[in-house]
Image: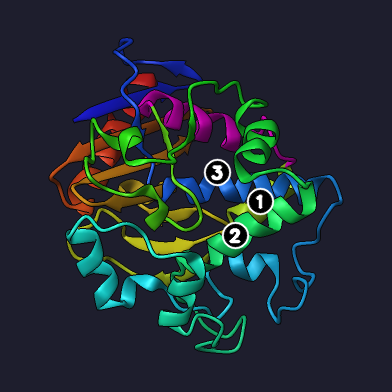
Amino acid sequence: MLISLISNGQSLTPDEPPIMVPWWSFTKTVLAATALTLVRDGRIGLDDPLPDQPFTLRQLLRHEAGLADYGELAPYHAAVANHESAWSADEMMQRLEGTRLRYSPGTGWGYSNVGYMLIARLIELVTELTIEQAVTQRALTPLGLSNVRFATSRADLAETCPNYDPAWVYHGLLIGPVSQAALFLDRLLAGHLLSAPLLEQMQTVRILGGPIAGRPWVVAGYGLGVMQGEIEGGLTSCGHTGGGPGSVIAVYRCSDGETSACCAVFQQGAEQGVVEAQCVRQLMQALRQAV
C-alpha cells in the first residue's frame, strides 16, 4: 500500500521512491480540471451543446449525457483478462452502439468512460494540442506537478499492472506517484487553478443515494469530474476513486473549518471500499491531529 497525506498544504508522509502508479479514473478529475480552465478562459461554455451533439460539457462531466459505458460489455472484460490489445475507439463504439443515447441528456445519470473520451477529444479540438500537451500546460504545470504523464505502452505499467494495454482506457490513463495525485487534488480544491465560482460548480453534485454497502459514504454524489460524499461527523470528502486490473487508487480531500487534509492511497489486490475506507481514516486522523 502506498499512502500520501497532506494537511493544510504540508506533506505528512516521508519521501519515498517515486513509484509510477496508474491513476485510473482519478484521471477524470484531471481532465475535468483541464476542461474547466477552458471555461475559465472563455474558450467553451459549460452549458453550450458540444459540436454536433445534443449534450453539454456540464452533462458530460457529471455523467448526465445519456451515454453508455464500455464496462457493460462482457467481451471487453474478457479481452482485458486475456491481456489482449485494446480495440480501436471506433471498434469499441461500434460494439457498444456508443452513439445511441440511453436517456435524454440531463434526465438521468450513468457513469460513462465514453463521456470522458469525448471530453478529451473536445480539449484537443479547442486547444489544438494533444491531450497530454493540454493537460500538462493547463493543469499539471500550473499546479506544480512534474512527474506525471500519460501511459502509452504496457511497459509504462510494468511495475504495477504488467501485460495491461493502457489504450483500454479510452480517455487516457495518467501515471505518477501517489504524492503527486494528493498534491494535485489539494492544490486544485484550495483554489490554485480555478476561480471560486468554478470550484463551486465543480463541487455541485447530483446526489446518487445514501449509504453504499462496503463503502465509507453516508451520502454519495457526483460533481464535475469529482466523486463527493458525506462521511462520519457530517464532513464532506471530494475527489475520485479509480480501479483497474489488480489495483485501486482513492484520492480525496476534506476540510473542517480552517483545517484541510488530502490523502491518496494506492493498493494492489484490494476492493475499492477497502482503499476508500483507508483514505477516509487517514483524512480523519489528520483533521483530529491538526485541531
Q: Check if residue 183 falls in the magenta segment.
A: yes
Element under disc 1: helix
* For the residues bearing labels 1 and 2, Cβ distance under 8 angstroms: yes
Answer above or below: position of 258 versus 116: above
Magenta residue check for 288:
no
Mark 1, residue position: 200
Q: Quadrant of the N terminus?
A: top left
Looking at the image, the residue that sits furthest to the left is: 269
What quarter of the picture does the C terminus occupy? top left
Give the crowd class for mark 3: few <14, some 14-19, many >=20 residues within 10 Å. many
Amino acid at pointer 2: Thr
Q: Nearer the viewer, residue 190 or 109?
A: 109
The image position of residue 134, as x and y in percent, is: 68, 40
Q: Which residues make up the magenta segment?
A: 177-195
In this image, 198 relative to 13: left or right?
right
| Position in image of residue 239 (x %, y %) | 45, 46
Count of number-bearing discs: 3
Whole-angstrom CA distance, mark 1 to mark 2, is 6 Å
The disc placed on residue 204 is 2
Identify the disc placed on residue 30: 3
Figure check: 232 above or below 115: above
Could one spot residue 291 in this view of the protein?
Answer: no
The overriding secondary structure of the stretch rendered in magenta is helix
